[in-house]
Structure formats: C-alpha cells, structure tokens
Amino acid sequence: MTHPTSCDPIARSVQVSMTRVSESGSCSLKDHLAIEEPLEIRVEALDGAVRTTKSIAITMRTPGHDGELAAGFLLTEGVIRSTSDLLSIKPCGADAGAHQGANRVRVVLADSVRVDWSRLERLVYAASSCGVCGKRTLDALEVQGLRPMPRTALVIPRELIRCLHDRVRAHQSTFNQTGGLHAAALFDRCGELIALREDVGRHNAVDKVLGSEFLACRSPSAGDVLFLSGRASFELVQKALVARIPVVVAVGAPSTLAVELAARFEMTLIGFVRDDRFNVYHGDWRVMDMVAEAVAAS
C-alpha cells in the first residue's frame, strides 16, 4: 500500500492584517489565522463486477495529513479494518490544477472490501464543527459491530488526567500561532504522548490521529487515552470506541448522547478537565484515586 508521509510541510496558518481596538485606541497589526479549506474524499472500490469511484464526503479541514484524515475517517466509519484493505491513498485531480488536486484525496480499496455506498453517502458536506451533519439516517450513526469495552486492569492516575491539557498545549504549534485549532492526542496509560494532530474540525483532528496510527500499522488501541481539546460529542466518543480506546478525556463538556454511548459500551468519559479538576461521567473505575476512595467507602 502507498500513502502520503505524515511529515507533510504544508502551511496550516496564514498571516493577515487586522486592526486591534482597545480602550487606549486602535492600531494596525499582523495576526495568524488557521487555514480552512474543503477536502473531498473519493473512494474506489469493487461495486459488483466493476470498480467504481465515488465521492463520499467533503469536509472542511486544516490542510495537511490528508491521507491520515481519509484513513481515519474510513476506519471509524467501519469501511476498513486493516491496512490490507487499502491499496493506495494519494491526492487526485492534479491535472485540474495543483490547488484543486491538493484538496482531493483518492482512496483505492482492495477487491475484498465490500462498501455499503448508501450508508456512506451524505446529503450535505460535513462542516468543520460537526462530523455527523448530513448522515442519511440516525441508524447510520452507530457503526455496526461495536461491542462493550472489557473491564481490564487499566487504571489512570488522577494526577495524570489533570496534566494532559498542559502536555497537549506544549505541542500545539499552530494553535499557539492562531488560537483557532482543535487538537486530538493519543496517550498511553503512563501519560506518554503517542500522536497529536491539530485541525479546525474536532472530528478531523481525531481522524488524523487515528489514521496516523492505522497507516503506521499500529493499532490505535495501543493508546489508552484519547484527549480532546474541546467538547466530547457523540461522534468523537464513537470514533474512540471503534478504535477500542477505553478512556476519552475532554477539556469541554460531553453531550447527552456521548454519555449514553460511553455508558452503553463501558467507556470512561471525562469532561471539563481544567484548574486541577474534572468530571467523570462514566467509568470511574478506571481512575486510580477514585477506585481507592470507593474501596475505602465500602
């Protein structure tokens, strides 16, 4: 299988002129803004006896790591399960112009992969703030074949959860310039950073992180904690579930559906991680100090 390298030197921010207004007056300054552009994901697969290419999604994203984004998207949609399902991932449409080609990626699947085109089709493009916009039916939201997480011996120290945000911020180079990007990061149970990606879209950042591990032939579940710099929506928790990551930690709030999904599949969902505190909405048995407190109280 061929795919783009993850070390992609593509601009993710641009400098613009602006006027800053304050009580003391106004002045002209330069500012950095996060770049947002559409990416069209096309898939070639066997449809009956004929190979067919279809556009399955258009997402607003920060340029770069597009191959990882496409792979992560197809992984968390349940289309692919191993790297043997992929023949190639590469930009397409280069003959129509360099810029247009850079905003399209073509994924070629092996003949053994059977694609349910109707389930993948979107009625509208996926906005950068909402990865599930345009799903044809609510039934398509839940990827088939999901099963509850096992209650293994994994326990995360409370202090580790508190410091994840600072560890992520230390690696957010584009966010430090623009203040306009979301981050997703994968950590192991000891708090070691495995992968981090930034994007204007929360779901894109997660897909890039999971896609980077998938394309490197490493199971995303080798990481025990998925960290989100924003809120925890249903779709983001579902992506962690598909990748078999048991703990999701978010700076922001979870949605009701995210909590219901975590409870149904025995995941640990933590929100509002800030100022040395956090809320555990489900799965407190995976938080070390809470386990000790529960034993002491019994």
Image (cartoon, rainbow, N blue to C red):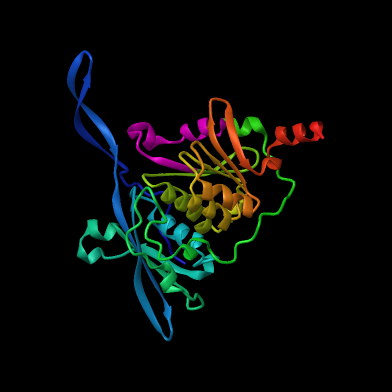
Residue 245 drawn at (x, y percent): 60, 51
Task: Verify whether residue 285 appears in magenta.
Answer: no
- Along the viewing direction, whichever of 275 and 53 lies nearer the viewer: 275
Residue 260 is situated, as x and y percent measured from the top left of the image, at 58, 50
Q: Which quarter of the image is occupied by the C terminus?
A: top right
- Residue under the point 41% across and 54% down: 131
**Residue at (52, 50) in percent of width and height:** 257
**Is residue 86 shown above or below 38?**
below
Compared across the picture, whether 104 is left or right of 254 comes to left
Q: Nearer the viewer, residue 247 or 85?
A: 247
Query: Which residue is more in the foreground, 101 or 50?
Result: 50
**To which quarter of the image does residue 5 belong?**
bottom left
Residue 103 figure quarter: bottom left
Residue 34 percent coordinates (x, y): 31, 40
* Magenta-drawn stretch contains 176: yes
188 sits to left or right of 202:
right
Magenta-drawn segment: 163-184
For residue 297, above or below residue 111: above
Residue under the image location 57 percent in, 26 percent down = 276
Q: Work out which residue is located at the far top of the displayed protein and give it.
A: 24
Which residue is rendered at x = 32% and y = 47% of the image? 10
